[in-house]
Image (cartoon, rainbow, N blue to C red):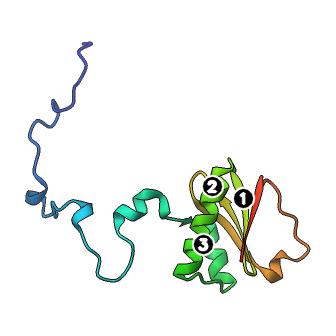
Amino acid sequence: MTTPIRAGQLFPHIVPPGQLGRNATPASQVQQTTGQKSFQNILDGTMVKFSNHAEVRLQQRGINFGLEQLNKLGSAIDKAAAKGSKESLILIQDVALIVNIKNRTVVTAMDGKQMKDNVFTQIDSAVIIS
């Protein structure tokens, strides 16, 4: 039997979202009252992700970022991407971050104590943020 299966043949009845108990409101219409960015803003590329390894390092070293620092980090990633960077060292005050520019993901983080006598490898750019 070589007849291909087409979409809709296996599940010919589509259930509307309202019948599944889900909200059918588009994400662009959902408003957040907590002051956080909307889902659409995140999709527009302003989001910075942290790998599991980076999250663990941030917690271990007591490093916290505020909204202003995250915005600066996002703009630094944008600048590095504009120059064609792939893996970048980003220095924010006394914190060093290794960032995968394409995925906008912080791979690891270290504070000033861990930066001393350290060699950063496999990076192709550095961005210093004041």
- The residue at the point 65 percent across, 83 percent down is 63
Q: Is residue 38 left or right of residue 126?
A: left
Work out how far the residue at label 2 is from the one at label 3, CA to CA, in angstroms.
14 Å
Disc sitting over residue 88 in the figure: 1
Q: What secondary structure is found at the residue carrying circle 1?
A: strand
Number of residues whose C-alpha sits closer than 10 Å to that of mark 3, classed few (under 14), some (14–19) or many (20 or more): some
Mark 2 or mark 3: name the one nearer the start of the chain.
3
In the picture of the structure, the residue carrying the numbered disc 3 is 72
CB within 8 Å, label 2 to label 1: yes
- The residue at the point 22 percent across, 65 percent down is 29
The amino acid on which the numbered mark 1 sits, given as a three-letter code, is: Ser
Mark 2 or mark 1: name the one nearer the start of the chain.
1
The amino acid on which the numbered mark 2 sits, given as a three-letter code, is: Ile
Disc sitting over residue 101 in the figure: 2
x, y (%) of residue 107?
65, 63
Mark 1 or mark 3: name the one nearer the start of the chain.
3
**Is residue 23 positioned above or below 125 on the image?**
below
Q: What secondary structure is found at the residue carrying circle 3?
A: helix
